[in-house]
Amino acid sequence: MITIYGERHRLHHGRSELIDGELKPCFETPRRVDIVHERLRQVGLGEVIAPSRFGIDALNRVHSDAYLDFLQTAWQEWSALGRTHDALPTIWPARGLRRDRAPLSIDGKLGFYAMDAGAPITSGTWDAIEESAHVALTGAQCVSRGERAAFALCRPPGHHAGRDVMGGYCYLNNAAIAAEHWLAHGARRVAILDVDYHHGNGTQSIFYERDDVLFVSLHADPSIDYPYLLGYAEETGRGAGQGFNFNYPLPWGTDWSTYAVALAHAGEQIEQFAPDALVVSLGVDTFEGDPISQFRLTSKDYPRIGAAIAQFGLPTLFVMEGGYAVEEIGLNAVGVLTGFEAHTQVAAR
């Protein structure tokens, strides 16, 4: 399996996020990718290539012009005020406030385009998130050109980012950008399977009224865990998208016995949809040792996830999402890929 990886992710290294009512060091760090990259080298999974460059139009298929402009200029506006610390919002457009007009002030803009204070903007954020999207696009391109599967080692992650909103360490929705790339280049239908611990609220919102993209997500029950305000089972799409969105919220303490049942149900939805290709939002924060999650999957379970995904027999792009800097992140993320590869090879015999 080919892997796409770029070094510019290091330019984004937030110092703090608001979590548990305190400003704390960010859990989302460059070390996450280093651990996965090292495990790829140890396993010898396949060739690792640098991302190609794509134009802004590839990002604009998913994100609004105004939002992309904001992301490109936010640090300059912030630092022009003499500020050298991370840019974080202090106000959000809650009920009763206007959501149709972006303020001129950078402090107002940060709140207007954010869902939380967990996506700090630094001097290198735009360069890092742009390359992360290019990593996903290169992976989609590789699969379009005949690769059975590819792994986009994206950082920062993307599945919490909506059309014009950032949050949860996410700025550009890499999985959605890859899916749109396929649709723009001949695919009729694309499925996105999100196995991150947290619901991919951004991906759901982007495709919620569409019937050409199926979104299926296994995640922690949003009534008790982030992102709290989206990800419930009754959210099944709207308009043309009705019946093309499936959420499987799971309780704290979920282990493989429970997770495997939900994954099998998710697989049934994907098979019935009969997509031309599959994007997997690959979060491994479902691991029992992850510092901000409450599931109980063990390292031996991740190859099982990969094998289950391989059974679909689809051209597949894995896009890295969550999973935080515990040593097992590399073992678990690469475990999904090796499980996928092993099942693919057996099926081909």
Image (spheres, helix red, strand yellow):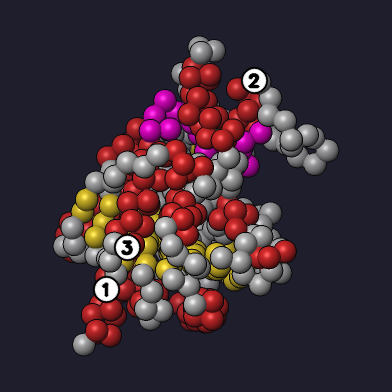
Is 333 in front, or is 317? 317
* Residue at numbered disc 2: 105
Estimate how packed mark 2 is, as few (under 14), some (14 to 19) or many (20 or more) residues with alpha carbons within 10 Å. few
- Give amino acid for label 3: Val
Label 1 SS: helix
Q: CA distance from mark 2 to mark 3?
A: 42 Å
Residue at left 45%, top 65%? 187
Labels in figure, total: 3
Residue 209 sits above or below residue 340 on the image? above
Estimate how packed mark 1 is, as few (under 14), some (14 to 19) or many (20 or more) residues with alpha carbons within 10 Å. many
- Give amino acid for label 1: Glu
Label 2 SS: loop
Residue at left 55%, top 43%? 63
- Per the rendered image, the range of residues in magenta is 112-127
* Residues at marks 1 and 2 touching, judged by CB atoms closer than 8 Å: no
Label 3 SS: helix
* Residue at numbered disc 1: 341
Is 31 in front, or is 268? 268
Quadrant, the N terminus: bottom left
Image spot of residue 105 (x, y percent): 64, 20
- Give amino acid for label 2: Ser
Number of the front mark, 1 or 3 = 3
**Which label sits on residue 143?**
3
Image spot of residue 235 (x, y percent): 69, 66
Would you say residue 115 sits in the magenta stretch? yes
Residue at left 36%, top 57%? 140
Residue at left 47%, top 59%? 183
Q: Is residue 43 visible?
A: yes
